[in-house]
Amino acid sequence: MSGGRPLRRLLRTGLVTLVVVAVVGAVAAAALQVAGAGQGAGAAPTAKVNTAKVTRKTLVDSVAVDGKIGYGAATPVASKATGTVTWLPAPGSLVTRGEALLRADNRPVALLYGALPMFRELATGAEGDDVTQLKDNLKALKLGKLTTTAKFDATTEAAVKRWQKVLKRDESGKLAVADVIYAPGPLRIATRTARIGGSAAADILTATTTTKVVTADVPSTEGRLAQVHNAVTVTLPDGKQVKGEVSQVGTGGGNGEPGTGSNQSASAANGSGGGGADGGGNTVSVVVDIADQKALGKADTGAVRVQYVAATHPGVLTVPVEALVALAEGGFGLEIRESGAPRVVAVKTGLFGGGQVEVSGQGIAEGKTVGVAG
């Protein structure tokens, strides 16, 4: 065919330049470009002939990176209590609804669940979404049969008094702004940021949720993985595989924690913002949610492998990438090595993956023998 020379024939010329071009995720090829003249028609080959068979298989284009199990980035817990910090929970401990997150002047400041921060005193006569949120918590703590209205009524006051008795606080029946800290759910204490004897009106702790996630720093060259809602497969240390979904994308910092990115989870306390990884521009940090938490076992940490499959082409004809020959008129061909002289035929390339490339074209069939650059 015009414009193409059989690969092995070209190796008999005076000068051969080998050029390998790699294009991530789209096009990868190996090309031989020949300069020189005076090829002898009857000369015998002097180079070793490498060959491969055209095979039919399922070709997968995927990205895999190392990750780790953890609880994601810790966020600050802010207290509005006055006085002196007299107690704080230990790092690694779990604080649930109704329990103390700190003691200020030896009085407990309790955790409740909700999206609204405690922004005003709640007492008889108050009405609003924050009252509904409080009543939901009091019901969950089994402190009385409260109405479903958004009004702080007598039954609400009675429930608050019962809770204050449990906490050994003054049974006033009303709650000050400093008495409660709201978070979306239970908190796992990461670090203490205040000290015993210090001011209680400060960021006192950092905490995470109790849901395990997988974090990974993805090289910027593999950015296809770093897209929110991407379905991924996580291989655990014991070889078991679980399904996950990318929930957060941020800037990389080498620590596997999410940076400022899409769909960040709510702050652990009072709507405070969370920190992120330092951006270096070389990696993208991702957080992967795992729906089947039981599959992660009891381990709080551990190395895992995160794989994202970009495309799958089942039952296609494939050859090693090194079998492709660059044609002078553009595109690629394969050197068919059958009985008689080798010949080059043009092919159309498809998916690349695992060192193989999908090919199609006239005369290309399973079992054909092709030349491969050695």
Image (cartoon, helix red, strand yellow):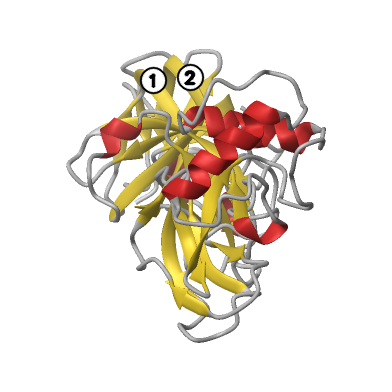
Q: Amino acid at mark 2?
A: His
Disc 1 vs disc 2: Cβ atoms closer than 8 Å? yes
In-front residue for pair 288/218: 288
Q: Which mark is residue 313?
A: 2
| Camera sees residue 335 | no
- Placement of 343 over or under 281, stated as above or below: above
| Camera sees residue 169 | yes
Q: Quadrant of the N terminus?
A: top right
Q: Residue at x 53, y 50 (%)?
A: 111
Quarter of the image for residue 161 reads top right
In-front residue for pair 9/196: 196
Q: Position of residue 252 (x, y in %)?
A: 58, 64
- Placement of 56 over or under 63, stated as above or below: above
Q: Position of residue 139 (x, y in %)?
A: 53, 27
Q: Secondary structure at mark 1?
A: strand
Q: Residue at x 30, y 40 (%)?
A: 235
Q: Secondary structure at mark 2?
A: strand
Name the residue that disc number 1 marks. Answer: 58
Q: Amino acid at mark 1?
A: Thr
